[in-house]
Structure formats: structure tokens, C-alpha cells
Image (tube, rainbow, N blue to C red):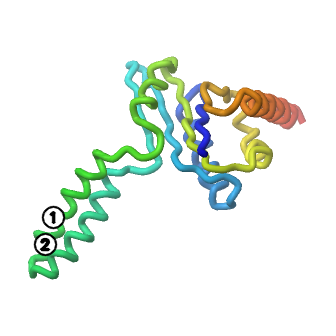
Amino acid sequence: MSSLVVVGFPNSQEAEEVRIKLAQLQTEHLIALEDAVVVSKDSEGHVKLNQAINLTATGAVSGGFWGTLVGLIFLNPLAGAAIGAAAGALSGSLSDIGINDDFLREVGETLQVGSAALCLLIREATPDRILKELRVYAKDARILQTNLSFADEENLKAALERAKAEAQALRLN
């Protein structure tokens, strides 16, 4: 079963940096992410979702490929590509995989102007190694929401506090 963790940051830049670092850690097999979305609230109070995967673009590329292939069969590859790309883009824009967009917008509404949250859907992870890698970001991070058990949530909060203390100690040295 996947775990949902929402971590708050004072700005979207820090949330993006952590998401990029988590993507690197995923290549090292320290974490398996199903979804990672940065939710931010701009100075005008508008909620923005920065998703890791653009489903509309992915659908358009995939649809264009399959449309061209079908078009070649019927001797009209350009029409097939155009129709396939349009159908793929429409399909991608209507898809919602990973974390529900309505939930993400609700998270965004709770944020203060200028702040951000990193919403993670984690399939599996090695928490101690991940927190060690992310401790430089721990000073400003706070757990906003999770579906972890109470005990696991307390362990995560304690680990985050330890990482904050380590980050503080590193800055002093």
C-alpha cells in the first residue's frame, strides 16, 4: 500500500529542490514514488499544481505515434498523426493518475501566500537514508498531512526533528 505524505515549505523553490533530489534518490532505489506534486499559492492567492508528469503532453506524443502508425496502414500518415495526437492529448488531459487533483487543490487552499507543499505518494522507501540526504532542507520542512499510522507519523516527525538538529549542527561547524 502506498503512503501519502504532504510536507510544507516556505516557498516553492525549496519544494522543487526536494522533489528533484527525491527523483535522484529514486534512481538509486532508495525511494519508489508513484507521484510527486509541488502545490504552491502565489501572491494573488491562486493555487498552482506543478506535476512531475504532464499527462496532456505525454498523451499527445503517444497518440501521435499510434496515429502515424495507423495512418501508414491506411496511406495517410499525416492525418493519422494529427488525429492520434489530438485524441491522445484529450485522453491525457482527462486522466488523473497518482494523487487526486481535487485533494491537491484543497491542500493549496490551506497554504499561506507564497508558501508551498510537496505532496508525495510513496510506494516504498528507506526513510533513514532519505532523511540523511534531505537534512539540508529539514530546517524549513514540516509535515502537513499523511496517511501513515500514528506511530509511523510520530517516527517520521522525530526523524525530521533529528535531521533539523543535524542540519543546524552542520551550519554551526
Q: Position of residue 168 (x, y in %)?
A: 83, 30
Q: Position of residue 81 (x, y in %)?
A: 18, 68
Residue 25 left/right relative to 63: right
Q: Residue at x 67, y 54 (%)?
A: 25
Q: Residue at x 48, y 32 (%)?
A: 39
Element type where label 2 sits in the image: helix
Disc 1 to disc 2, C-alpha distance:
6 Å
Amino acid type for the residue under numbered disc 2: Leu
Q: Position of residue 112 (x, y in %)?
A: 51, 18
The answer to whether marks 1 and 2 mark residues whose Cβ atoms lie closer than 8 Å is yes
Q: Position of residue 170 (x, y in %)?
A: 85, 37
Q: Residue at x 74, y 49 (%)?
A: 126
Question: Which is more toward the observer, 42 or 103?
Answer: 103
Report the residue marked by disc 2.
78
Residue 58 left/right relative to 117: left
Q: Residue furthest right?
A: 173
Q: Residue at x 80, y 29 (%)?
A: 158
Quarter of the image holding residue 153? top right
Q: Does residue 74 sit above or below 47 in this rendering?
A: below
Mark linked to residue 82 = 1
Element type where label 1 sits in the image: helix
Amino acid type for the residue under numbered disc 1: Ala
Q: Residues within 10 Å of mark 2 (few under 14, many from 20)?
A: some
Residue 18 left/right relative to 113: right
Q: Does residue 147 sit above or below 22 in this rendering?
A: above
